Image (cartoon, grey):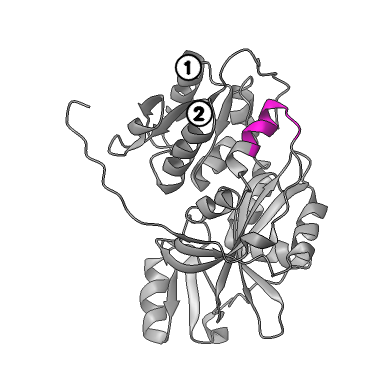
């Protein structure tokens, strides 16, 4: 946390969600409205989303890369008297973790990693190197074509979700995709089930809880069918992350189990998970509300998974929302 600003307990807390029109932002909006008395203000690049059904106020804003983005966000914060800002997408974390941005937003509570630390974990190449250095197993990186063993994975060094993540089966695939995906990284292909760990770290880098779920089906990088599996021990990975004292806020990472039973982390995100967060919340680990409670200055107890939640399964489905031009 970057500010010593104290939120008044005499009014409803006002929470600003950025990039709120996507899968994660819509879930957060719905969840906050169901479980709290916070006033929710959502912003997004597009008005074609169902947010007006759940947020108290909605604003259309330009891309986070637009030169006017910060001034527009500051205007919204001033007009709506925002107490807490929650960045939702990876691109938002890029922007709001910068110290220069946080100086501009002084007076609004926000919890992100320091920018340089965020980049270490957001850039796939830097992330794998860093995790290996602290004793966490990651896939092998193929530095040049002569090292490649098919099948393998190609992906952008910086990306969100599974966009442009492709399995390469032969040289033909390599020639095509290595030209199409700029600034890429090519890594070892890992067999087996995928698992995601949803975590929340406090401002001092201590983990307040970690929930393991198996990704049974995914769409666009987000889990659409997932199941709690708290029989897998991840304590060693969490301890190594805590020892860095740099991991803060909601994060998630994905791993597979190698033949020698070692856990191999192949993805790391310094944000809320995009698909299975709802399952973690349903299991009792309410990361969205715990984050706000921390930023309010409330004491937050460490969460531990309960044996009875093992096997709890989420099936995500689509629903329809209709809008008229005059809405």
Please give left or right for residue 210 compared with residue 11 in the image.
right
The structure residue drawn at horizontal position 82% and vertical position 54%, both measured from the top left corner, is: 243
Q: Is residue 85 visible?
A: yes
Q: Quadrant of the N terminus?
A: top right
What numbered label is drawn on residue 80? 1
Q: Position of residue 215 (x, y in %)?
A: 51, 67
Q: Is 279 located above or below residue 184 in the figure? A: above
* Quadrant housing residue 64: top left
Q: Position of residue 56 (x, y in %)?
A: 41, 24
Q: Residue furthest left?
A: 325
Q: Is 35 located above or below residue 167 in the figure? A: above
* Quadrant housing residue 124: bottom right
Q: Is 76 located above or below residue 181 in the figure? A: above
- Magenta stretch bounds: 290-299
Q: Is the C-beta separation of discs 2 and 1 under 8 Å?
A: yes
Q: Is residue 296 magenta?
A: yes
Q: Is 113 located above or below residue 8 in the figure? A: below
Q: Position of residue 302 (x, y in %)?
A: 76, 46
Q: Which residue is mark 2?
A: 16
């Amino acid at each position: 946390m970057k500010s010593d600003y104290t939120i008044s307990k005499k009014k409803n807390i006002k929470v600003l969600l950025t990039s709120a029109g996507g899968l994660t932002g819509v879930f957060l909006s719905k969840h906050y409205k169901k479980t709290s008395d916070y006033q929710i203000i959502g912003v997004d690049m597009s008005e074609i989303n169902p947010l007006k059904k759940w947020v108290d106020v909605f604003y259309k804003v330009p891309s986070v890369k637009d030169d006017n983005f910060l001034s527009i966000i500051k205007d919204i914060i001033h007009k709506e008297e925002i107490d807490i800002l929650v960045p939702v997408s990876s691109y938002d974390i890029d922007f709001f973790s910068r110290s220069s941005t946080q100086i501009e937003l002084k007076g609004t509570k926000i919890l992100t990693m320091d920018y340089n630390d965020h980049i270490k974990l957001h850039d796939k190449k830097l992330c794998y190197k860093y995790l290996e250095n602290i004793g966490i197993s990651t896939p092998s990186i193929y530095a040049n074509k002569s090292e490649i063993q098919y099948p393998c994975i190609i992906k952008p060094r910086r990306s969100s979700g599974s966009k442009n993540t492709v399995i390469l089966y032969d040289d033909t695939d390599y020639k095509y995709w290595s030209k199409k995906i700029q600034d890429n990284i090519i890594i070892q292909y890992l067999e087996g089930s995928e698992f995601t760990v949803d975590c929340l770290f406090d401002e001092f880098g201590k983990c307040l809880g970690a929930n393991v779920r198996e990704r049974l089906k995914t769409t666009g990088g987000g889990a659409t069918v997932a199941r709690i599996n708290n029989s897998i021990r991840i304590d060693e990975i969490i301890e190594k992350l805590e020892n860095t004292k740099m991991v803060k806020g909601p994060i998630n990472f994905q791993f597979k189990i190698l033949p020698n039973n070692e856990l191999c982390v192949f993805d790391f995100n310094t944000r809320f998970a995009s698909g299975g967060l709802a399952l973690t919340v349903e299991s009792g680990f309410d990361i969205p509300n715990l984050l706000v409670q921390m930023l309010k200055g409330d004491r937050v107890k460490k969460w531990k998974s309960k044996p009875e939640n093992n096997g709890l399964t989420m099936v995500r489905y689509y629903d329809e929302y209709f809008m008229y031009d005059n809405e």
